[in-house]
Image (cartoon, rainbow, N blue to C red):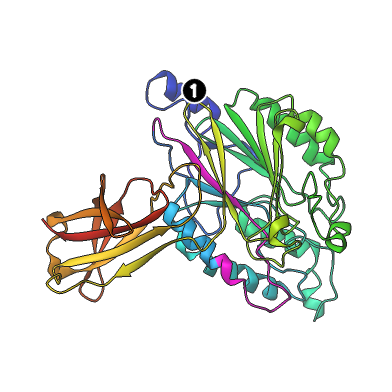
Amino acid sequence: MIRTTGGLVLLLALLGLASPFALHAAAGRPLTSFPAADLKEPAAGADVLFIVSGDNRPTAPGTPMPRVLGTIFEEIGLIRPDFVLWTGDTVYGYCESREELEQEYQAFLKAAKPIAGKVPLYNSPGNHEIHTPQTCKTPADQLCGAPCSQDLFRSHFGQLYGSFDYAGAHFIALDTADPQQPDAITGDQLTWLKEDLESHKDARAIFVFSHTEFYSSPLIDTPDGNSHPAVANRWELQDLFRRYPVKAVFSGHEHLYWREPAAQHDGIDYFIAGGAGAPLYASPDRGGFSHYIVVRLTPDNKLSYELIEPGRLFVEDAPAGPGEAKEAKLWIVDSNDLQQPLPLRGVDLEVPASLGRCDALTATAQLKRGDAWTPVEGAAVDTCTPASGGKQRVHLKLPPLARGSVQVTVRRR
């Protein structure tokens, strides 16, 4: 992660060497991406684009990760946002040993391979990651409860709570899983939160993410709703948030989608985004479906939230027809109903080295609707590197994708 102090950012800005929207970790409590990836400098004049998801834990200890989790990460790898905010419960937890819990983290890491090294992911701890002491297998594993789970969380995500800056906006992760103060923000964390908000009162926007929800969904199944209380001191926190440029609060815990409108909460949107694969707590018509949220902050500070159900965005090889041996083709399909086209920053294709040198390759794209083809402007070969097996790996530059199917062709100039 790139880190600079606030004083250095100001000095560089005055010298004309850095944008006033530079990024840095908030002093004292930096967050860590898992899987590892660097937070890159924002492009001048570009939207801030990030994704929110969470609650992917398996159905029981020792069972597989949900398949939809892999689909979500494949799609995030195509969109390649600036970063991802995760609302907790990356593992089942409640372990019998430290080794068992670490194996679960590695299963999450394996599912997240499409974004490893490319897109930072920051997580707020859930009750399945941080938990009270358990009955342990052996005396050597007596720390398999809260101390061990907190230690392992820190080893992967840096802090139980913390913050970072990006493009002039501020992002805060809260810990609602402290076994001594569950489902609340109190004590040292509350003191830190007040100081952090005050020190970033001039941010263009502030976003908060946590595991426990601030406002429970009224559509959740009753048994699950009874066991998932909202943050206990939410009124105190909302009174705090409204004094600062807090735009949205993202949480999980309830395995469904819900949005409390900003008009009812001092201009702040409260989301529940708990749809990354954990057992659902409502039927689809009541928010019980897999999902993630694409958030955009434009240069003029306009915000949009796109709710996406995974499975409708994918890339697939297109077989070459007769006489097309010197071409490589793929389909890019987006069947989502969205307000605006999806930016795709992570489209890669392996092509035969026999097509020619990298600097001799070009790309074209066409949108197919019915039997008609419409040219898509802006397709290009961005980078090209040698790959194994007589292949070359091509990274494609493409315009944002609206609903439909686009065929991309890479050929020699």
Which residue is at 47% across, 28% downward? 299
Q: Is residue 68 inside the magenta stretch?
A: yes
- The percent position of residue 351, horizontal first and vertical second, equals 23, 67
| Residue 79 placement, left or right of 235 | left
Against 132, is 138 above or below?
Answer: below
Above or below, 367 relative to 391 = above
Q: Nearer the viewer, residue 203 or 395?
A: 395
Q: Report if residue 116 is visible in the image.
A: no
Residue under circle 1?
A: 10
| Residue drawn at the location 63% of the way across and 33% of the way down | 206
* Residue 10 colored in magenta in the image: no
Who is closer to the viewer here, 67 or 158? 67
> What's the amino acid at mark 1?
Leu
For the C terminus, the image quarter is bottom left
Depth order, front residue of 14/45: 45
Dominant secondary-structure state across the stretch colored magenta:
loop
- x, y (%) of residue 245? 65, 27
Residue 337 at x, y percent in the picture: 51, 50
Q: Secondary structure at mark 1?
A: helix
Query: Where is 293 relative to 280, above or below?
Result: above
Magenta span: 44-69
Q: Quadrant of residue 387?
A: bottom left
Residue 413 seen in render: yes
Query: Which residue shows up at 83% across the image and 39% down it?
Result: 234
Q: Quadrant of residue 215?
A: top right
Q: Position of residue 293 (x, y in %)?
A: 58, 49
Res 318 quadrant in image: bottom left
Q: Nearer the viewer, residue 335 or 19?
A: 335
